[in-house]
Amino acid sequence: MGDARTATVERTTRETDIAITINLDGVGTADVDTGVPFFDHMLDAFARHALFDLTVRCKGDLEVDAHHSVEDTGIVLGQAFARALGDKRGIERFASCAVPMDEALVLCALDISGRGQAFWAMDIPVDAIATFDTQLAREFFIAFAANAGATLHLRQFSGENAHHLIEAAFKACGRALRQAVAVNPRTAGQVPSTKGAL
């Protein structure tokens, strides 16, 4: 594999204090504490299905709400992912995964393109799951994609239960990223682009 694909990123603002360590070639071990229990559960599912080892510590202004904590965690996780990935030599680059969770079916299709964009085609039927504002799932993926340099599509084919829908999105993203960062020995370490750079 060569050099370890790991990174640690720390970011402190007046709203959040975040430290994230990621290993793209891990076994899916997650140690997450953001102060938002449902979000912790989603990041744990993401890491386990991506097979990324992930440590997240976030202290945010939860007395306001969870928005800054969730969005800023997406920013820092995206930055750590991009740093760990390096020059992208030999990776598969494109991937997709559709994850069913009971009645819910969610597709994640992505391209580690260097152009960070997220396209959210999900209809979450309730405003909150416990203390988690369901709108924040979209904000997380936008922040992650922008900072990871990935073009990310999340699309709902079916589903009625908000927990199932959001969890399927996190699992599908993890599974797709696992495929996209995999190293293909047939490419001889080349960057997967006709431009020669991503």
Image: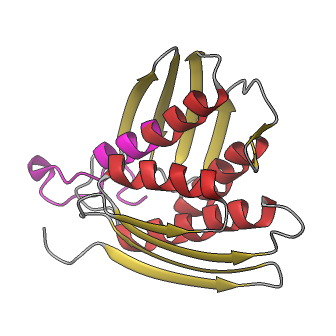
Image quadrant where one finds the C terminus: bottom left
How is colour applied across the structure in the image?
secondary structure
- Residue 196 lies, in percent from the top left, at 35, 58
- Residue 58 lies, in percent from the top left, at 63, 75
Image quadrant where one finds the N terminus: bottom left
Residue depicted at x 72% and y 45%: 130
Q: Which residues are magenta?
A: 172-198
Count of labels shown? 0
71 to the left or right of 10:
right
Instruction: Tell me if residue 174 is in the magenta stretch.
Output: yes
176 to the left or right of 11:
left
Name which quarter of the figure residue 23 lies in.
bottom left
Q: Is residue 170 above or below residue 124?
A: below
Residue depicted at x 52% and y 14%: 103
- Residue 102 lies, in percent from the top left, at 46, 18
Q: Is residue 57 above or below residue 42?
A: below
15 to the left or right of 137:
right
- Residue 162 lies, in percent from the top left, at 66, 29
Q: Residue furthest right?
A: 64
Residue depicted at x 67% and y 26%: 122
Q: Nearer the viewer, residue 41 or 80?
A: 41
Instruction: Tell me if residue 157 is in the magenta stretch.
Output: no
Q: Is residue 116 visible?
A: no
Q: Is residue 145 visible?
A: yes
Residue depicted at x 34% and y 46%: 49
Q: Nearer the viewer, residue 3 or 51?
A: 51
68 to the left or right of 72:
right
Q: Nearer the viewer, residue 33 or 11?
A: 33
